[in-house]
Image (spheres, grey):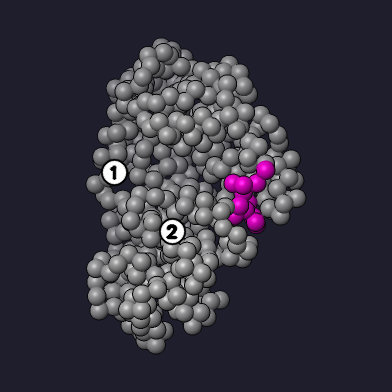
Amino acid sequence: MPGRRLKRAAPARAIAHEILGRVETSDAFADVLLAHRLAETPLSEADQRLTTLLTYGTLAWQGRLDHHLAQLASRPLERLDVPVRVALRLGLFQLLFLERVPAYAAIDSTVSLLPQRGAAGFVNAILRGATREPERLTLPDAEREPIRRLAVEWSHPAWLVERWAAEMAPEPLIARLAADNQAPRTALRVNRTRTTRSAVAEALAAHGVATEPGRWSPDALVVARGGARLRTHPTYTAGDFSFQSEASQLVGLVAGAEAGMHALDACAAPGGKTTHLAECLGGRGLVVALDPHGAGVRRLAERAHQLGLGDTIRAVVGDARRPPTTRRFDLVLVDAPCSGLGTLRRHPELRWRRTADDLPRLADIQREVLQAVAPLVRPGGVLVYAVCTDTPEETTAVVRDLVAHVPDLAAENPSALLPAEAAALISDGALRTRPDLHALDGFFAVRLRMRR
């Protein structure tokens, strides 16, 4: 975004507008962009919170916002320039969902994002129309179009609502949709090889960052207040903690890495589970991490060094579908590419990128990876398969096909590897978490033992 635009517009809204535009025109994720912009921009804590709320909220409610904008605008949204379309969503989000923001402030601050007079006038007219004629902002009829009504009302793609409606009763369905629109709190994983959870909590508190112990993972701290610039905090740069959701941390615990093991993280990017496995090894053992991109390998190696794990992690360029090794491992982790439908609250943009056709395509990739790395599990070793989704195509169906292809693999219950409360998240022998049931990202993980 040009410097002059940042001077004209309120910083929080200008940064949100910039990030939303980049998400709209690329495969970038808002959380990554937001973390970098907040780290490099001097904002008050209130403006940091507002920037985050505007970014996540506008993306999460985009479906409903677009529905109402189509009722207000004479031009199709897809024909508008990206900065205009994004500004309209940002402004309408404030009008509809932020009661503490006066309508005039929401409109004026949005208009200031657009230096072109014609675009600014167009946005001004649309948003003022929303305040003058709120009766125009209607939802589809629930009797005639029940799926479309839910999809618009709760801002999810209709194909996904239709799937879930076939699997759930109405009340659980609405709870699932609502949970996806609640942005999660930031979770940290304390580096157990260097420090303790209480020590990190005290160090962060001294810098105005309030945290609480995680409910599910013994290594987790959840940020309650003041965490916008944690990536520049001395405890982060010193390697005392990493950013990782609690559900993702539980996958590392299900893996059951122990000192002396040699492990393979077959789909390592961006490296959170790799470094967690290495921390569980306590410096005694090895984790080979595959990433198909050289840049990813370099970033992982740098982070491993920062965490004091450089001697435990060997980052290698390689595609898990064609592993660049034939050695056998005690533990193989496959955190496979997936639809990510369990992380819609953390990555709201995914709901607008995924289609129903993605599910069988991704399931084929998952099968290909698993069948390629299964021969790398030594007799008596363990294979852990994990995805951040709960679609049957990517979870139970993939595991069933793997066991049929490699009959020596047998599922084993990982409850004993988890804290008592987290053990309750094991269902039918697999870790299953959901945002509406557990306030966690939706994950599936299964632990399989190679019998011979």
**Residue at the image position 68 percent from the left and 31 percent from the top:** 194
Q: Which of 120 and 256 is in front in this view?
A: 120
| Left or right: residue 424 compared with residue 29 | right
Instruction: Please name the residue that numbered disc 1 is placed on.
Output: 359
**Residue at the image position 38 percent from the left and 60 percent from the top:** 21
Q: Which amino acid does label 2 sit on?
A: Ile
| Left or right: residue 263 compared with residue 20 | right
Q: Is any atom of residue 143 visible in this view?
A: no
How far apart are the alpha carbons under marks 1 and 2?
27 Å
Find the magenta span and give its range. Answer: 223-234
Q: Nearer the viewer, residue 317 or 225?
A: 317
Instruction: Please name the residue that numbered disc 2 is placed on.
Output: 19
Residue 377 position (above or below residue 2):
above
Query: Residue 394: x percent and y percent?
Result: 33, 39
**Residue at the image position 36 percent from the left and 79 percent from the top:** 117
Residue 148 position (above or below residue 25):
below
